[in-house]
Amino acid sequence: MAKLCRYPLFVLLLSSFLQLTLADIATTIIASVFKKTKTLNFVMSPRLLIESLYPIYVGAGGDTLREISKFLKIEDETKLRVLTEFESDRKRIAQSLKGTVTMATALFGSNKNKIPDEYTNILIGILNTDYQTVDFKRPTAAAKVINEWVANNTDNHITHLIDKTPLGAKLMLFSALYFNGNLSLPNPKEITETFYSTLIGGTESRFNVSATLTKIRLQYDFLKEINADIVSVPYIKSKVKLVFLIPKEKNDIQTIENNLHKVNVSRLAPKKRKTFELIIPYFTVKSTQNYKSVFEYIHDDRTISYRSKTFLQDIIQKIEFKQFKSHSQGASGRASLHRSNGLARISLLHPFIFLVKDKFNIYLAGRIGLIK
């Protein structure tokens, strides 16, 4: 672990630089990770992945520090300013989410290797990161401790993350997220519809699915950069929205993934309003992703390297998301728009992309390519 400088643990007034920086990074992360993952249904948390980099940033130096700073777009900032801004941002998030999203990050170190107290104090005090020591020479027992931490921090919705820790591990970083919210849907009706997908072998597959039908006034727009419609559905008593990116060409999720990095996060908050008939299928997405090669995802040709004896072994993220009736716990899809009873209809019955976000953060991003 690189030598740490001594930073006082106090809070500066919040400015918008960190919020805006992280928001703009998120779309690049989403596009990069989606292009690298092959599963039809996949969900990730760009916000949680970004947060996972800060414990590394605190203890890093040299090339590692420069690479992380470049990625987070904070090359000209001091660690003091970045960390105090981060702490303030976390407090703002905690207030605005009001229990809708639970995010947690923990660093597990070897009980044989002493981590500097100064480092652990910053993890706990500013980054709100749990730090624990485990015996990595007992992989199954160490995994049990880690799985218990994940369960405790996701209200027992995610109860198992890993079977055992890898041999030779010195530091492992884990992040978990659980989302729980109710969409603001007036008079929702449960219906059965057909979900269409050509993402399996190129032939059209059809599946009968349960869905919710409602008449609702929504914010919407068309994003030329990704050739997709965007629709924003609010959650009850929350600043968080469920945003759908709907390809104009059926099943064409790839155009969104290839070009999402071109979309400024402010464009993901549509301003136009119109009353629609909205059909949202029920779906469940569970993903476990290893982000050891996160910098390969972003740069393709560069990775973070740790040259000291203590190094980061893995960043592992586990996400669970459910959409059932008006209750959410993101994914992807395609919506078709046509006229019905004088209203435009949005039917999420083809593959689509979804985002769970507020003004400054994207908490979940998912791809739904198939619903059975």
Image (cartoon, rainbow, N blue to C red):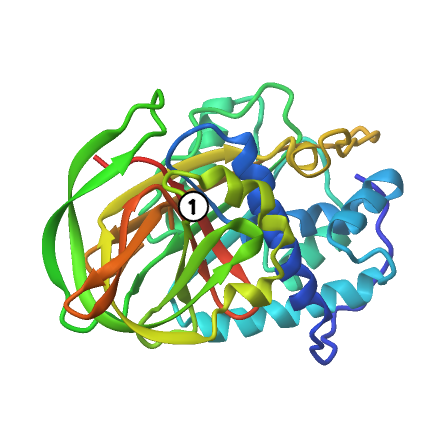
Q: Position of residue 95 (x, y in %)?
A: 48, 75
In the picture, measured across the screen, residue 135 lies left or right of residue 146, that is: right
- Foreground residue among 237 and 241: 241
- The residue under label 1 is 366
| Residue drawn 43% across the image and 57% down it | 229
SS under mark 1: strand
165 in relation to 270, above or below = above
In the rendered view of the protein, which quadrant contains the N terminus? top right
From the viewer's perspective, tell me whether residue 236 is left or right of residue 64.
left
Q: Residue 185: image x %, image y %?
A: 23, 69
Q: Tell me if I can see residue 145 in this picture.
A: no
Residue that appears at 35% across and 43% down: 158
Asked if residue 58 lies left or right of residue 161, the reply is right
Q: Is residue 303 above or below residue 319?
A: above
Q: Position of residue 220 (x, y in %)?
A: 41, 67
307 sits left or right of 325 in the view? right
Q: Amino acid at mark 1?
A: Gly
> 284 and 159: which one is in front?
284
Residue 314 is situated, as x and y percent measured from the top left of the image, at: 61, 32
Eyeballing the image, is 36 above or below 74? Answer: above
Q: Is residue 228 visible?
A: yes
Q: What is the tally of numbered marks visible in this picture?
A: 1
Give neighbour class at mark 1: few <14, some 14-19, many 20+ (Cα, 10 Å): many
Q: Quadrant of residue 151?
A: top left
Q: Which residue sits at x=38%, y=76%?
A: 273
Residues 272 and 118: in front is 272
| Quadrant where the C terminus is found in the figure | top left
